Amino acid sequence: MTDTFEQHLNEAADRVTVALDALLPRAEGPEAHLNSAMRYAALGPGKRLRPFLAVEVGRLLNVDERGVLRAACALECVHAYSLIHDDLPCMDDDDMRRGRPTVHKAYDEATAVLAGDALQAVAYEILAHPDTHQRGSVRARLVERLSRASGPYGMVGGQMIDILAETQTFDISVVTRMHRMKTGALISYAVEIGTILKDVEDHVRRALEGFAHDLGLAYQITDDLLDAIGDQDEMGKAAGKDAGQGKATFVTILGGGGARERSRHLAAQAKDHLDPFGARADVLREAVDFILDRRS
């Protein structure tokens, strides 16, 4: 990973954090406890990888920066809400996230549920606002696609399969479907934002769709590997939970070596999809390497 890539990643994270800080409700009034929990979840430490992808694709396509940044903030709100709910005792029951207490531990379970609900609502409020794009049809498309990516056909549906994986035996096709829904759908949306905000040719759209499709699955396979062999202190959360719960993952089905080879193959395919953009997509190519090499 080059210094230039780190600079792009950190700059995008900083810009999204500043924008989110302005868009989220302040911890004031009788509901201050809720707003504080929302801000704790959304503004805390994190790579902001999904917003980074949105910003970088926007840069690649020369899309208006304000619209991209607002849509990226909406996406980060949905991602933050999903992590709050994912950590709850009725889901993964995690006490630590990104090296600090999860929301239900820092606050309480009821507040965590409400904070997640509220962050999801704020996401759609951001997208629906005229500041995101002057055309209502474009804003409606952003809302529609995020709903699709985060609901029963995407992230939430994938989470349901993940829960069932604790008690049912799934083959590689179901595990692949689960990962494409649970993780890949929001990554695909991050890349799609730029092609919604600006009209692009079909071959450009298809190339970016293919890139996101392979990148999302490679990301989740890397997550499976980290859960199996990663360092808990480096990850900032518990390791070895999948095996402990008897879940089917790429690692349990293919073995560590097979899972690693599958992720490398997907990474190579993701980069191939960027060929039409030449050197202008070099930062996105480095993002693929970053995802494969990450330790958290």
Image (spheres, rainbow, N blue to C red):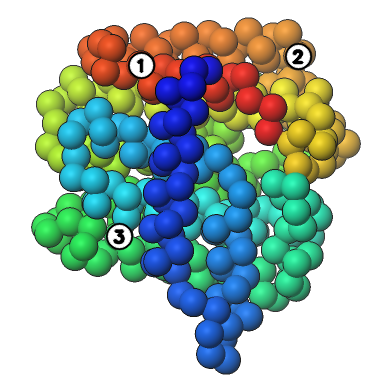
Q: Nearer the viewer, mark 3 or mark 2?
A: 3
Q: Mark 1 and mark 3 in contact (Cβ < 8 Å)? A: no
Observer-nearest residue: 75 or 257?
A: 75
Q: N-terminal of the two: label 3 or label 1?
A: 3
Q: Residues within 10 Å of mark 2 (few under 14, many from 20)?
A: some
- Asked whether the viewer can see residue 119, the reply is yes
- What is the C-alpha distance between the residues marked 3 and 2? 40 Å
Q: Nearer the viewer, mark 2 or mark 1?
A: 1
Q: N-terminal of the two: label 3 or label 2?
A: 3
Residue at which label 2 appears: 256
Residue in the picture at 63% in, 8% down? 261
x%, y% of residue 289? 52, 17
Q: Is residue 139 left or right of residue 11?
A: left
Observer-nearest residue: 156 or 48?
A: 48
Residue at which label 1 appears: 282
Q: Secondary structure at mark 2?
A: helix
- What is the C-alpha distance between the residues marked 2 and 1? 29 Å
The numbered dot on residue 177 is none
Residue in the picture at 50% in, 65% down? 119
Residue at which label 3 appears: 127
Residue in the picture at 53% in, 90% down? 29
Q: Is residue 233 left or right of residue 45?
A: right
Amino acid marked by disc 3: Leu
Amino acid marked by disc 1: Asp
Quarter of the figure with the C terminus: top right
Q: Residues within 10 Å of mark 3 (few under 14, many from 20)?
A: many
